[in-house]
Image: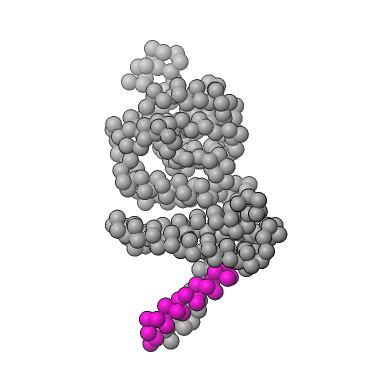
Amino acid sequence: MAERRAARDPCVRVLRRVGERGLATAVMAGLRAARGEFVAVMDADGQHPPEALPLLLDAAASTEADVAIASRRVAGGEDDGLSRARLVASGGATLLARLALPTVRRARLRDPMSGFFLARASSLPPLERMSPRGYKILLELLVAAQPRRVVEVPFRFAPRASGASKLGGRVVGAYLAHLASLARREPRNRRFARFALVGLSGVLVNLAPLALAQRWLAGAGALLALAASLAAREIAVLWNFAWNDALTFRDRRASRPFLSRLARWHVVTLASTAAYLACDAGLLALGASALAAAAAGVLVGLALNWTGAERWTYSSPSAV
């Protein structure tokens, strides 16, 4: 069908690739071949309505935006095409993108996971600087281009007309690897990298006393074991605070007195622990495995810890 349309309409060109597979390389081939003032990326399985393209174009032109995103998460948008499992996966992927990529946070994007978007050709970075993997081309474009203005336009994400979802372990792994690569390329991510490394060391500090006292705890009562666990956690909390105060947020220590920073750190830690437990319990109730539920809880706790530390514990008094 596409070839027949191209034969009748000189504005339509069809690229047929031989020996290549994957959405990322297909999109890059399309960007190289595009000649218009704007370029758009969308799926062909019926979930991205072509009728939304003029809306994206009008939004980009009227706001002078570099990128216009068809969004399921802004007012007027819908995501009827997602199953419950994909909704949870999409929400988790969005949370990770916001956590790892300052570009997403700065643009205040509600739907950075969208696969339907439009960009000014003049705002695209040199294509050799882009190395997308998997299906989240938009994130690659945002990090590589660092657009000045991004707008979101609501659209209805329809049920799939044909084909099947490719969501699976391989896709999830490719997304996490791509996100890690993008995070390393983000110029504003050094602080978060230090925060994450300190948090990883805190996990070891938390477990070390319990491992050393394991033989003794085996014969102790439940209350003593719980007390030991709480003591080990407090040691880890203080460890994380000390290193983040000395390294990660050293330039912000003057914003508040030491005891105020320490108290706020504990409040944020308690909130993140509650969020971890709620996420873990909720996913277990939905039938997730214990390992998957715990991993998701850890990520939610990390996100809340980072957000609370950056925006509250180490914010200037005037910013709160």
Across and down, in percent, residue 271 comes to 48, 61
Q: Nearer the viewer, residue 125 or 313?
A: 313
Q: Residue at x 61, y 34 (%)?
A: 148
Q: Nearer the viewer, residue 116 or 21?
A: 116
**Residue 37 versus residue 117 in the image, above or below:** above
Side of 190 where 279 appears, left or right = left
**Residue 196 versus residue 73 in the image, above or below:** below
**Residue 132 versus residue 237 in the image, above or below:** above
Across and down, in percent, residue 291 comes to 37, 62
Q: Nearer the viewer, residue 183 or 152?
A: 152
Q: Residue 236 in magenta?
A: yes
Q: How is the image coloured?
A: one colour
Q: Does residue 178 appear anywhere in the picture?
A: no
Q: Does residue 272 appear anywhere in the picture?
A: yes
Q: Residue at x 56, y 49 (%)?
A: 183
Q: Residue at x 36, y 35 (%)?
A: 78
Across and down, in percent, residue 318 comes to 65, 51
Q: Quadrant of residue 107?
A: top right
The quadrant the N terminus occupies is top left
**Residue 315 versus residue 9 in the image, above or below:** below
The mark tally for this picture is 0
Q: Which residues are magenta?
A: 218-241
Q: Residue at x 54, y 69 (%)?
A: 237
**Magenta span: chief secondary structure:** helix
Side of 292 where 254 appears, left or right = right
Q: Residue 320 in magenta?
A: no
Across and down, in percent, residue 159 comes to 30, 34
Side of 157 where 63 appears, left or right = right
